[in-house]
Amino acid sequence: MSKIIWYEHHGALVAVDEELKGKHREHCLCYRCDLFKPNQVDNCDLAEQNFRACKINNMTMPVYECRIFKGG
């Protein structure tokens, strides 16, 4: 079993599974979706909602399933 570590992320102290730290983009379906356009006005609404929740709560939530995924 891997260890839980603490580190500062965007100014907040957060816990993470040491083996998963920094692997959000590898796991998140958004990064493979044609609708995902971060920092653009036409970014996916679901991705924007997820990102807002992450910012508010100092969390990272990779998406594993999505009802509107586009691409391959």
Image (cartoon, rainbow, N blue to C red):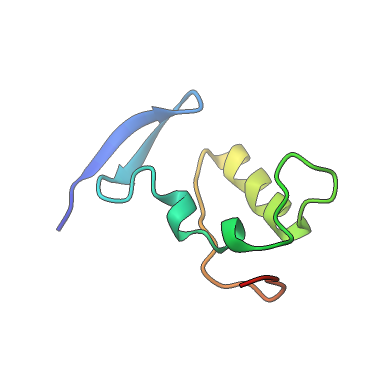
Res. 29 image quadrant: bottom right
Q: Residue furthest bottom?
A: 67
Residue drawn where x is 74% and y is 60% of the image: 35
As drawn, 22 above or below 11 = below
Residue 10 drawn at (x, y percent) = 51, 27
Q: Residue furthest top?
A: 11
Q: Nearer the viewer, residue 47 or 34?
A: 34
Residue drawn where x is 67% and y is 44% of the image: 52
Residue 49 drawn at (x, y percent) = 71, 53
Q: Residue furthest right?
A: 41
Q: Nearer the viewer, residue 20 or 31?
A: 31
How many marks the image carries: the answer is 0
As drawn, 52 above or below 72 = above
Q: Residue furthest front?
A: 72
Res. 56 image quadrant: top right
Q: Nearer the viewer, residue 59 or 48?
A: 48
Residue 60 drawn at (x, y percent) = 49, 47
Of the 4 image quadrants, the one containing the N terminus is bottom left
Residue drawn where x is 52% and y is 38% of the image: 58
Residue 6 drawn at (x, y percent) = 30, 34
Asked if residue 15 lies left or right of residue 9, the reply is left
Residue drawn where x is 59% and y is 61% of the image: 32
Of the 4 image quadrants, the one containing the C terminus is bottom right
As drawn, 30 above or below 22 = below
